[in-house]
Amino acid sequence: MLRWSTAGESHGEALVATLSGIPAGLKIDFEAVARELWRRQQGFGRGGRMKLERDSARFISGIRHGATIGSPIACLVANRDWENWREALPVESGDLNSYKPLAAPRPGHADLAGALKFNLPEARYVLERASARESAARVALGAVAKLFLGRLGIEVASHVTRVGRATVQREVSWHEVRSACAKEEVVLNCCDADVEQRMKAEVEDALRTGDTVGGVFEVVAHNVAPGLGSVANWDERLDARLAAAIMSVPGVKAVEIGIGIQAAQLPGSAVQDEIGYSHAERRFTRATNHAGGLEGGMSNGEDLILRGFVKPISTLRRPLASVDFATRQPTKASYERSDVCVVPAAGVVAEAMVALTLAAAALDKFGGDSVSETCRNFTNYCEQLRNY
């Protein structure tokens, strides 16, 4: 069973991530992990913290001589900004005069709901954990999950299809998505250069007016074998697990699989993916992929197509109306350093979540205490599919 968790706060000393269940013998490409962390920090419209932090993962357990050993993996992602907050947020009692309360909750954030839930006088501690900074730890673990999936021939990548009013109107191929993720310069991670320039203009307009802008990213999982997930129980359905994983990405307010939203207004004859068979390849085929690679809670052999709809960042340089925690009087929401657009970064975090979810589903089906055992079981299953 694959299990994982993160700990740490936005301005704490470090983020901590643990991953249990990865089989022994998986070689870790540390440069690949570093690149995933780098990708999360890129994109036009990111804020000042991305200039301060240069994320790297320091693995402290579960890996020896460059390969997993079957025990839980743990890693640290340091917060360089900790030095500026050490006195304000010490682990020990410290000097309360150095504390920096969040005076007024920000609309769209966890501030008010969290303060009420935990019975806190204001929302500094809520902000610290709810911050999207935590997602760096997820990306580090997701990079390991990607390396594991790679042994099964599975690849996961993302691209941006919409920022504000600028949207990609055509179908994008897997090759284009993969190529976009391999670029050394990330603007908005859009596969269409002309649309990307219109997206950039949307971000510039929001920046100029003190506003923020959201959009849509698409995650594609390529070469996923049919049969991951299960129809047996509701919590084993792969589509439900993937939807929850993407919904957990900060800022995501809706998830779509395949043509899910459009399908609700089309006749069934225009939605279902008709089935064929390739005798040359000895496999079942689909004329279309409207289902996004998922049917009945299971992968069906087509690419998994998942979209996350990201709201505009809640922290605005032109603050919205709020109420002072102490006086209960009307005021403007507190302002913390913020981005203008995070859609490309949200896509990278969603990749990590999809990779972790697929790795868990693959281990559920193929098992194995070592990577060689998992791969052997997977190879036997592929042979079973060819002989079906």
Image (tube, helix red, strand yellow):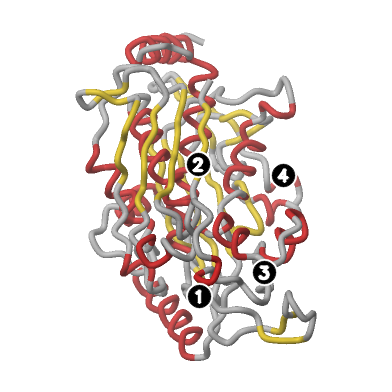
Mark 3 surroundings within 10 Å by alpha-carbon count, few (fewer than 14), some (14 through 19), many (20 or more): few
Q: CA distance from mark 4 to mark 1?
A: 31 Å
Q: CA distance from mark 3 to mark 4?
A: 40 Å
Question: Between disc 1 and disc 3, whose residue precedes?
Answer: 3
Question: Between disc 2 and disc 1, whose residue precedes?
Answer: 2
Mark 4 residue type: Ser
Q: Secondary structure at mark 1?
A: strand
Q: Residue furthest right?
A: 328
> Is 329 rendered above or below residue 295?
below
Q: Which residue is mark 2?
A: 6
Q: CA distance from mark 2 to mark 3?
A: 23 Å
Task: Point out the frontmost of discs 2 and 1.
Answer: 2
Residue 50 place in picture, x, y as percent = 35, 66
Q: Secondary structure at mark 2?
A: strand
Q: Which residue is mark 3?
A: 108
Q: Which residue is mark 1?
A: 166
Q: CA distance from mark 2 to mark 1?
A: 34 Å
Task: Point out the frontmost of discs 3 and 4.
Answer: 3
Question: Between disc 3 and disc 4, whose residue precedes?
Answer: 3
Is the C-beta separation of discs 1 and 3 under 8 Å?
A: no
Q: Residue at x 40, y 50 (%)?
A: 14
Q: Considering depth in this image, is 273 or 180 the residue closer to the camera?
A: 180
Residue 76 place in picture, x, y as percent = 36, 42
Mark 2 surroundings within 10 Å by alpha-carbon count, few (fewer than 14), some (14 through 19), many (20 or more): some
Mark 2 residue type: Thr
Q: Which residue is mark 4?
A: 269
Question: Between disc 4 and disc 2, whose residue precedes?
Answer: 2
Q: Considering depth in this image, is 189 or 35 the residue closer to the camera?
A: 35
* Number of numbered discs: 4
Mark 4 surroundings within 10 Å by alpha-carbon count, few (fewer than 14), some (14 through 19), many (20 or more): few
